[in-house]
Amino acid sequence: MKLEQYDGGVLIRVDPGSGVAIYDQIAASVRAQLARGALSPGDRLPAARELAEALDVNIHTVLRAYQDLRDEGLIDLRRGRGAVVTEAAAPDGPLLDAVRALIAEARRAGVGPQSLISLIREEYPS
């Protein structure tokens, strides 16, 4: 597993051995940081080239992750400004509280992370 810390202390996690595409892992790591409040509207993500070098991945992999985040409205991509977190990415307090409560309940019930994810995907298909 490769971890890269960048300005603001936010961690990008990738596992090349995982069955999940690296660009999906990068985007998921940013989404997780947004959900935790580690990233706020106006914060800048590292330059794609800088992150690609740090993670030892192709720059197009990072750009694909950033494009997905842009398409979701979580970041704004501008030449010269880089990737900036949008106002729409601010964590929703009640939703975050509900997710934390769900995780706590799953732990009490002995439901593992993968089982919980499967249950969520069944109830909320993409």
Image (cartoon, rainbow, N blue to C red):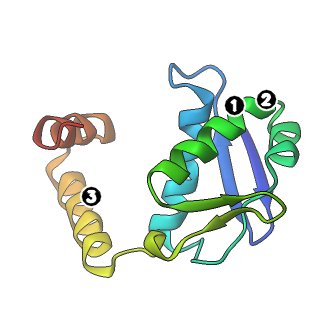
Number of residues whose C-alpha sits closer than 10 Å to that of mark 1, classed few (under 14), some (14–19) or many (20 or more): some
Q: CA distance from mark 3 to mark 1?
A: 31 Å
Picture coordinates of residue 64 (x, y %)? 62, 36
User: Residue 50 bears which disc, if any?
Assistant: none
Q: What residue is drawn where x is 68% and y is 74%?
A: 43
Dot 2 or dot 3, earlier in sequence: 2
Q: Amino acid at mark 2?
A: Val
Q: CA distance from mark 1 to mark 2?
A: 7 Å
Query: Looking at the image, is mark 3 or mark 1 nearer the viewer?
Result: 1
Picture coordinates of residue 2 (x, y %)? 74, 37
User: Residue 103 bears which disc, if any?
Assistant: 3
Q: Amino acid at mark 3?
A: Ile
Left or right: 113 as drawn, with respect to 50: left
Question: Does residue 30 sit above or below 122 in this rendering?
Answer: below
User: Residue 57 bears which disc, if any?
Assistant: 2
Marks 1 and 2 close (CB-CB < 8 Å): yes
Q: Does the rendering let one see residue 94?
A: yes
Number of residues whose C-alpha sits closer than 10 Å to that of mark 3, classed few (under 14), some (14–19) or many (20 or more): some
